Structure formats: C-alpha cells, structure tokens
Image (cartoon, grey):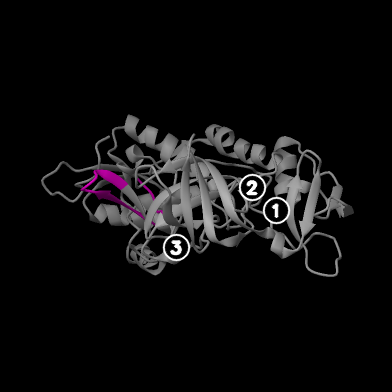
Amino acid sequence: MTDMNNIKNDNAPKKRVLIAMSGGVDSSAAARVLMDQGLECEGVTMRLYRDESITDNGKSCCSDRDEDDAAFVCHQLGIPHESLCCTKEFRSCVIQKFIDEYQAGRTPNPCVDCNRFMKFGLLMDYAREKGFDAVATGHYARVERNEETGRWQLLKAVNDSKDQSYVLYMLTQEQLSHILLPLGGRTKDETRAIAADAGLINAKKRESQDICFVPDGDYAAFLMRWAGIRAEEGDILDEKGNAVGRHKGAVRYTTGQRKGLGFAAGEPVYVTGKDMKANTVTIGPESSLFHNGLEASGVNWVSVAEPERPIRVTARTRYHQKEKAATCVPLPGGRIKVIFDEPQRAITPGQAVVLYDGDLLVCGGTIERVFDE
C-alpha cells in the first residue's frame, strides 16, 4: 500500500480505496465524497456478529438489514461491494476480551477493540493483500501529516459533538498513512445532505448506539448466554466493609451507578467499587467517586513522539466526555500517570483515557487504576 499524501494530484495514478460500509449514512456519504475526488472506490461490509436469538432493535450495527443497505448503496453509487465474514475473528478479539474484562471486574470498551483488531487490523491487511492504496471509514476525525516532523497526526473532528477520535487512539503511524476519513471536516447535517443529494436510501437512517452484541444492554444475560457466567447474589458492602444488603450479581453493576441498587439509605449512595472474586459490591456517597489520578497501560503515542518529561494535556476518560486539564507523566513499560487539576468522577478501570493538545490527539491507553495524589 502506498501512502495517500497526494490523493488530489491529477497527474498521479488513480488511487484504489476500500471503504468500510456499515450500511449507515456516514460510510455511505464517505464513499460519495471519495468518488467525487476521483478515487477508485469499492465497498466492503464486515460481517462481525450474528445472533438469531436477538431481535434487531434498529439501534445497533451489524444486522442483516445493515449489510443489505450497504450493498444497495454501493449499487446506487455504481461501485463493487462485497461482504467479508469476520465473525470468528470478532468473537476471539472483541467478544472474548469483553467477557474476560467483565469477569475481572473491569468495564471494557469494545468499540476501541473493534477498531483496533477489525476495521484497522484485519480489514487493512485484507486491503493490502488486494492491492488497495487505502482504507476509508465514516468516522468523524481527521488525519493530517506534519510536514516538519514527517509524522502523521490524528485530530478531533471539526464538529466536536460528533468527534470519534477517542475510539481511534490505537492507530499507528503505518495505519494513519493509509487511512482516509473524509467526514472529519463536516457536520452530521452536511453528511446527510450529501447522502440525500445522491439519492441514497439511508440518508435519513438513524444512528446505531448500542454495542452490537448486547443490543438490549443486558450484560448479565449476554454473559450467561455466551460464557455461562451466572449473576449470583452477593453482599453489598459499605465503605467500612460491613454487609448492608444483597445485590443481584456483581456483573450487573458499574462504577458510579445509583439506580437499581435495591438498597434504601438515608442519603443517595452509588457503586464505588466491586470485587468479582468475592462477588461483592461496595457503595458510598458520591464524594467517594472522585479521584484526581489514574495510571494507564498499553499507551499509544499517536501524533507526537513519547516525551521525556511531563506534559500538559486535556484528557477524556469516557467517550464524548468533556476534556479536563491534566498533567501526563510518562512511565516505563508503555504506561502513563495522569494527574488532573481537579478530581474527576467515576474514573473506571478498563475504559480508555485519551489525551489531547487542542485538537491534536496526543496518546491513549487503558485505565488500570485510580488514586489520589
């Protein structure tokens, strides 16, 4: 694969682009934009997950309808389309990790792993084998090359409310040099207008929101169905370790949760921790959810080289969360320590922490622990 630094050069050979088509309006509009740039486009839909026991609620991706919509959009655009069965890889790389993390008492982000292993892992390898120059998606983020440093950089979308850079922090320099994100400078309304002007069938299709393999949001039922993990009752503990009630299975609870505890108290209480081995859930006042420090592992330095000294950044510990001012301290072994200027609520191990310098995505990693400093 050759890099796409000069895709608008009329004298260069026409570039071949493989577009990840989900069946939604974003990837469909992305295909239209790239075709208008004179690129040779082909669509591919990754068949990631199928479970006939779950009814398509229209809020998650990867359904048969989505695949049909992607194929029909490619027909409308006059470009080839193929479906790529990746269910085995998706199960081992994404679903199994999700299960393992929940069993360990952590809260994983499967969208990050899907991008890491599937869209920009398996699919990019497939594109390389088939002779494509780049892979394109409908993600709202931007890729640019810093001509002074020669380094590829990942930036937030122009439309901050739609920015998806958080779930792309794992991208490498090699991957960034072969990725096209044509919607990064557009709003959602502009994207829908592109699809409508092209007469595409999904111009008004609503967005997917839920995890594709848990579309009903019932994690305990999913874990039972796929891994035989039962949500056994156990003790609810106060912060002193005293049993104050019973829960319906620790896997059903997440840090910061208030509703559904089945516990009456004189003041509002929240889940502040859980121990999967002991099958206990700890509750406490909201103030116990706030911490000013975290440590993360598996850190990928995206747009800049790893610094030798602490740097000032803004940080997100959840998708679409407003960034908060912090200091990042590089640690040995691909780890970082992040110290926030002000304590943050419900920082959760297993989630991603992503650091920015303005619009520039600096790095990201997996939260391992929280602390106060």
Q: Earlier in the sequence, mark 2 or mark 1?
A: 2
Residue placed under numbered mark 1 in the picture: 254
Query: Is 269 or 54 nearer to us in this picture?
Result: 269
Relative image position of residue 283 (x, y in whole percent): 78, 57
Residue placed under numbered mark 2 in the picture: 107
Mark 2 vs mark 3, CA separation in Å: 23 Å
Relative image position of residue 154 (x, y in whole percent): 36, 51
Relative image position of residue 213 (x, y in whole percent): 61, 46
Q: Are marks 2 and 3 in contact (CB under 8 Å)?
A: no
* Residue 362 visible in the displayed image: yes
Q: Amino acid at mark 2?
A: Thr
Q: Is residue 2 left or right of residue 369?
A: left
Q: Is residue 86 left or right of residue 145?
A: right
Mark 2 vs mark 1, CA separation in Å: 7 Å
Q: Amino acid at mark 1?
A: Thr
| Identity of the residue drawn at 43% across and 49% down | 310
Q: Earlier in the sequence, mark 3 or mark 1?
A: 3
